[in-house]
């Protein structure tokens, strides 16, 4: 697949990652039955506990979903951190073969990459993972609408970083080298 086609595909996915939260902006999930069951089990709740805009309550059947979702978010965050640290190597290797002004441009792009990669991880992906895992014990977490918006922004940040990497020559070359190395080693092992 050509780089341009791949970049367009990533941009399209990026667009859909923002669009898919629209249904959750229109209406919130139905919580009535879960709240009624919880009312029976808790004798003296806080005064605002039954406000549906404050908490979302889960049945036991959703516990597996919470763990799976949190696990996938943690993997995404770890991969993005790995990408940022690997970028140090890319800049160092590419910087030795270019002029000073080119090196400064690459360094500026690298700082932008770090910002775009780390902000979704530190401020979006990891906190929402903690909230979801905490929901396993407390049976509640702050509102579902916020969760979906945060998840959308996290995916948006990850895909934006991927788009920027593909649009910048040293990172694109390094990604292509890694792809060839992986596929060539797989082909050799099959032979």
Image: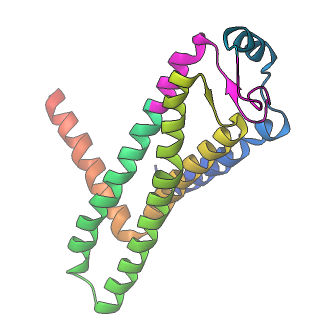
Indicate the position of residue 37 as horizontal and vertical percent values. Answer: 73, 9
**Side of 28 where 163 appears, left or right:** left
Please say whether residue 50 is one of the residues in the magenta stretch: yes
Residue 186: image quadrant is: top left
Q: Is residue 88 above or below residue 145?
A: below
Indicate the position of residue 76 as horizontal and vertical percent values. Answer: 43, 42
Is residue 73 or residue 106 the one in the foreground?
73
Q: In this view, does 20 lie above or below 157?
A: above
Name the residue rendered at 67%, 14% in the picture: 42
Residue lying at the far right in this picture: please name it.
26
Name the residue rendered at 21%, 42% in the picture: 184
Residue 21: image quadrant is: top right
Name the residue rendered at 55%, 48% in the picture: 154
Indicate the position of residue 140 as horizontal and vertical percent values. Answer: 62, 27
Name the residue rendered at 59%, 22% in the picture: 139
Is residue 88 or residue 59 the one in the foreground?
59
The magenta stretch spans which residues? 44-70
Indicate the position of residue 106 as horizontal and vertical percent values. Answer: 37, 78
Please say whether residue 130 is one of the residues in the magenta stretch: no
Q: Is residue 42 above or below residue 113?
A: above
**Side of 186 where 34 appears, left or right:** right
């Amino acid at each position: 697949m050509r780089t341009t086609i791949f970049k367009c595909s990533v941009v399209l996915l990026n667009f859909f990652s923002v669009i898919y939260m629209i249904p959750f902006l229109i209406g919130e999930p139905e919580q009535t039955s879960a709240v009624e069951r919880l009312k029976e089990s808790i004798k003296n709740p806080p005064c605002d506990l039954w406000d549906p805009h404050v908490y979302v309550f889960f049945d036991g059947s959703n516990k597996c979903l919470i763990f799976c979702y949190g696990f996938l978010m943690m993997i995404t965050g770890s991969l993005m951190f790995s990408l940022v640290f690997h970028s140090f190597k890319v800049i160092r290797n590419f910087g030795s073969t270019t002029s000073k002004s080119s090196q400064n441009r690459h360094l500026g792009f690298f700082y932008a990459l770090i910002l775009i990669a780390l902000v979704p991880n530190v401020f979006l992906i990891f906190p929402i993972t903690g909230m979801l895992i905490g929901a396993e014990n407390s049976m509640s977490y702050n509102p579902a609408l916020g969760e979906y918006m945060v998840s959308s922004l996290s995916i948006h940040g990850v895909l934006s970083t991927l788009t920027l990497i593909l649009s910048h020559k040293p990172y694109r070359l390094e990604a292509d080298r890694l792809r060839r190395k992986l596929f060539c080693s797989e082909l050799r092992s099959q032979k």
